Image: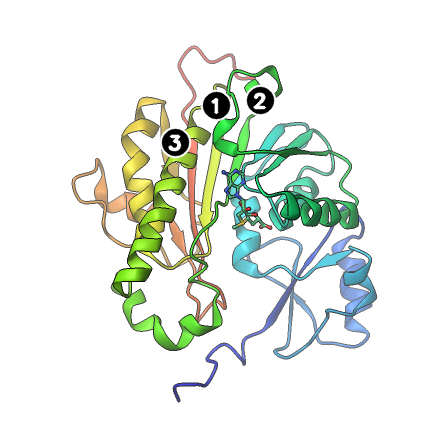
Amino acid sequence: LKNQNPVISKPRYVRVNTLKMDVESAIQEIGKTNKVAKDDMVPDMLVLPSGVDLHDHPLVKNGSMFLQGKASSMVAVALCPKPGWKVLDGCAAPGNKTIHLAALMKGKGNIIACELHEERVKVLQDTIRRSGAPNVDIVHGDFLDIDTRDPLFAKVRAILLDPSCSGSGISAERLDHLLPSFSKGHDVDAATSQRAKKLAAFQRKALAHALSFPEVERVVYSTCSIYQTENEDVIKSVLPLATSLNFELATPFPRWPRRGLPVFEGCKYSQSQAEHVLRTDPREDMEGFFIALFVRKKSINSSGK
Ligand code: SAM
């Protein structure tokens, strides 16, 4: 049993890029050769039978559809940016979530996609070009160096932060070796634990930075890691700052059954904090993702803009 891939019989997901094609037309086209249905939770997501390979499908090649997993596609939907907003994607390449934001915003408003590594900026450019998104500007640099008072960023209303992580929720070898520790929320061995801690140090800084943008109303934090260190622990560490800036955790996809690990003891409303955040399971849901959404409470004097 050890080498069997437990996700092999799971369905395939594909996201329709509504900047180029509507969902009904995509279903009609894909339905000519495959059984296809709409996902019941993530808009614009199609579900196909296990084993279907769409890599060479013309609609994938021309950017009308993207082979993005369901869990990964939940992140931009959770942020829920409105057409016309200014939105920042803090760690953007290869750009799957950037172009998903663009589609949700119907190509209106402005998305700034920040990416540190030059070779990944090229991949990001290519993804944006294929998607046809007209409203994305790329910033090649360190997200942590962005001056939140710079006029270019001062009006950012929503931030998607999907920082570098261990990838433990999607790496193939994890399926054999790491799953037993997942349910306990523990890291696996000393080296893995050290690496996760190092990544978490950046993730904490980046999330704190995202929350400090003056006009930001919504911040979504996500990883494709199954480790508590990179997930609940990061959220827990920024909660005091978030609260001081008038943010609270919101509940993305409230119907989704898998929520966070119950590690928020000592925090205000500790039980519900775990229930706000969302996990997907690498076995059941194909990918192990973590999503937390911060929403800024409207101040009493808010003009309602
Ligand atoms: N959101 C992307 C998507 O869905 O296609 C995946 C993002 S990937 C998990 C993290 C990205 O952040 C990598 O491309 C990495 O190079 C970039 N990165 C790492 N540190 C960064 C930093 N300090 N500033 C900006 N980007 C950074």
Q: Position of residue 155 (x, y in %)?
A: 58, 20
| Residue 103 relative to residue 203: left or right | right
Q: Is residue 136 above or below residue 155?
A: below
The residue tagged 3 is 208
Instruction: List the single residue furthest toward the left.
Output: 266
Distance, label 2 to label 3, CA atoms, is 16 Å
* Disc number placed over residue 153 in the picture, else none: 2
Specify the quadrant that holds the C terminus. Answer: top right
In this rendering, does residue 260 appear at all? Answer: no
In this rendering, does residue 234 appear at all? Answer: yes
Circle 2 packing at 10 Å, graded few (<14), some (14-19), many (20+), is: some
**Kind of residue at badge 2:** Phe
Please state which of residues 53 and 18 is positioned toward the viewer in this rendering: 53
The residue tagged 1 is 213
**Kind of residue at badge 3:** Ala
Distance, label 2 to label 1, CA atoms, is 8 Å
